Amino acid sequence: HLQVWNHVCTCCSAAALEVCYDELGCFEDLPPWGGTAQRPAAILPWSPQEVGTRFLLFTQKNRYYQEIKPDQSIQASNYGGRRKTRFVIPGLVVTDDEDWPQEMCKVMVKQENVNCIAVEWKKGARTQYAQAANNARVVGAQVASMLSFLMGRYKQTADKFHIIGHGVGAHAAGEAGSRTPGLARITGLDPAEPYFQDTDAAVRLDAGDASFVDAIHTDALPFSSGLGLGMSRPLMPGCSANRGPPSELDAIWQGDSRFDACNHARAYLYYEESLVQPRGFVGFPCSDSKAFAAGQCFSCPDGSCPLMGHHADKSAGTDGVSKTKYFLNTGRTAPFSRYSFRVSLTLDGPSWPNPGFMYVALAGQYGTTQEHQLHVGTLVPGRTYDMLLDAELDVGRVEEVRFRWNNHILNPMRPRYGASRVALQRGSDQETWFCGMETVVENAVQAVPPC
């Protein structure tokens, strides 16, 4: 049932429009929804039928999805009223990966006994960007309506629900949260910038939309100059920056213009991997990325470093409102998780300096990391060399540090170098010391045991 009517503005020449959709309520195109600097076009959202939203349920009892609706038919599904429920709302329909919410749900129910609902709204998303951004309002309202139905039917409370939204879908999650008092959590995966950044809190995902709101930013180049779809600057390793005028937004959104969605898509890839490898996404408190890269922000005071991704709400220090920025490194390709160590190695060797390279690897109860370059340049015995080592493997308890060096050029003097002492720290752990009792020739590996 669709009703459309005009409200005549007696104090100005413009007329505002409003549409109402049954239990979803009414939607208008007045500010802050339209006619503002951030949202210049005044656009009404499509009807639920045009948006075509579907709710696809995954549980540990069904290998494939069951489509559910807020009516009696849900009795035939495997929805469990005693389990937590997580909704996954996509944004940009990424070519060759448009069903990623379903894949995320499959991974999620393998890891935990929950109801995972993939929200599909491809019909409403495959249009001009500004229209899709407004259609997301209806999607958010539909998710809130489904939440209300589930809470009423299964006597669940809002603190048992979590909404995960990507891009424009993050703001749909915010809309659902603003309509659902007491919602436990919203996770924004690279929340979209165009038509949302610097808008009123009612328009975008906001900290007040749930009891716990976390966001992963992966494509934060300013859209006006760098065609970044996310909200505010890092570029992900392994991804390229996009170039082009902002006028290409619609062509990008509809898939008609070449656009590398790598940065934007990384957010949900990180989140999915964090389900399986939570300790590989530890965030370190730091003022800015330069200080983090320089190794100035490695420690976790009182073990308070949070986990990015699925397990963020289980971390210490996540109660209340925090304005702390957290940084971490990720891999260029999957697996993206990294396990960070601070390494301080004191070099032993001949009395004269020598140009060369130094490498270290960590061996532990679950395997051995790749070699990581510790230093390139002059090797000075007695000097301590520091680095942040982002291991690609969780080795567990480190049982041995492996040191290797080589020359820049052929050296007829055949010097020998070794690690006399290595201090190793991981996150909030205490430093562990390793002591070397020998030096080795070029390209030989020295095994340095605990002191």
Image: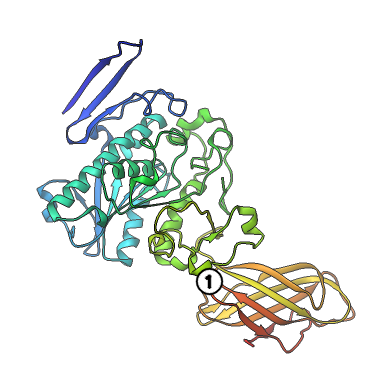
Residue 111, position as x, y percentages in the image = 33, 67
- Location of residue 136 by image quarter: top left
Horizontal side, residue 322 vs residue 222: left or right? left
| Closer to the camera in the image, 425 or 416 | 425
Return the residue nearer the eye: 300 or 402. Answer: 300
Percent of width and height locating residue 338: 53, 65
The N terminus - image quarter? top left
Instruction: Report which residue position mark 1 lands on.
Output: 428
**Left or right relative to 414: residue 340:** left
Please name the residue shown 19% across and 62% down the image. Answer: 82
Image quadrant containing the C terminus:
bottom right
Which quadrant of the figure has residue 429?
A: bottom right
Residue 116 lies left or right of residue 81; in this view the side is right
Q: Nearer the viewer, residue 409 or 59?
A: 59
- Residue 359 appears at what percent x and percent y? 70, 73
The answer to whether residue 9 is above or below residue 243 is above
- Badge 1 crowding class, 10 Å Cα cut-off, few under 14, some 14 to 19, many 20 or more, is some
Amino acid type for the residue under numbered disc 1? Ser
Please give the name of the residue rendered at 9% of the width and 49% of the height, measured from the top-left corner.
72
Under circle 1, the secondary element is loop
141 above or below 66? Answer: above
Q: Position of residue 42 (x, y in %)?
A: 37, 23
